Amino acid sequence: TAMQTMRETHENLTQSFVVLRGSAPAIPAVQELETVYTNYTAALDVAEASLREQTPPQTLQTTVQTLVNFQPLIHSNLQQITAALDHAETGAWQKLLFWLALAGAMLSILLVTTLFRASREQVIEPIQQLQRSLDQISHGDSKAPLWGTERMDVIGDLARAVDLARYRFTEVP
């Protein structure tokens, strides 16, 4: 049963390596664990061969003790890898949050710019056009066309009201 436990540990370690080689090859503990894994595999093979060949109990006990001694090394390396991956994951989240915040700021600037342009086109420019027409009228050109009377919004209402007032003032004898 001890050999079964060690073989299960070996299989779990093999599966872990498949994942670690792809996701965290730059972590030094992964490289150290790979060395431990290679030595553990060799010792496990020797122990299994010793069992098949029925070697003396003292030799088998030494081999099994060697395998048991690998357990703390494996555990320590796995803890280091887990800590490194947690740190990398935290860094990845921080980077993601930074880029999301930057994207949010850029969208806010775009929204404010769009709203400014829309307000300029819909409110400021028409009022400036109406003001220029009123300036012509105020300088004595009572027959000058009044800009904006064709509009169907508040600015058009204002232009029509001014045009009506102009008409009434020019019609008075």
Image: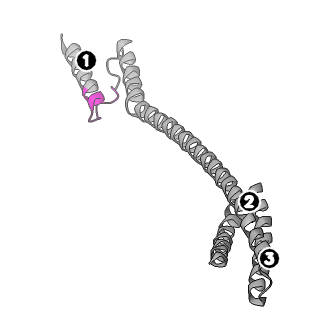
Q: Is residue 30 left or right of residue 101?
A: right
Q: Name the residue under label 2.
A: 73
- x 69%, y 53%: residue: 80
Where is residue 135? Give x, y as percent. Answer: 39, 16
Q: What residue type is labelled 1?
A: Arg
Give residue 82's mark.
none
Q: Name the residue under label 3.
A: 58
Q: Are marks 3 and 1 in contact (CB under 8 Å)?
A: no
Magenta stretch?
A: 146-157
Q: Do the residues labelled 2 and 1 touch (CB within 8 Å)?
A: no
Where is residue 116? Give x, y as percent. Answer: 45, 32
Q: Which of marks 2 and 1 is nearer the N terminus?
A: 2
For the N terminus, which image quadrant?
Answer: bottom right
| 3D distance between C-alphas at marks 2 and 3 | 24 Å
Where is residue 108? Give x, y as percent. Answer: 48, 37
For the C terminus, which image quadrant?
Answer: top left
* SS state under label 2: helix
Where is residue 8, by image quadrant?
Answer: bottom right
* Prevalent SS, magenta region: loop
Where is residue 94, by image quadrant?
Answer: top right
Where is residue 126? Give x, y as percent. Answer: 38, 29
Q: Name the residue under label 1.
A: 166
Total number of numbered discs in the rendering = 3
* SS state under label 3: helix
Residue most toward the top? 173
Q: Do the residues labelled 2 and 3 touch (CB within 8 Å)?
A: no
Residue toward you, 152 or 61 = 61
Q: Is residue 160 left or right of residue 50?
A: left
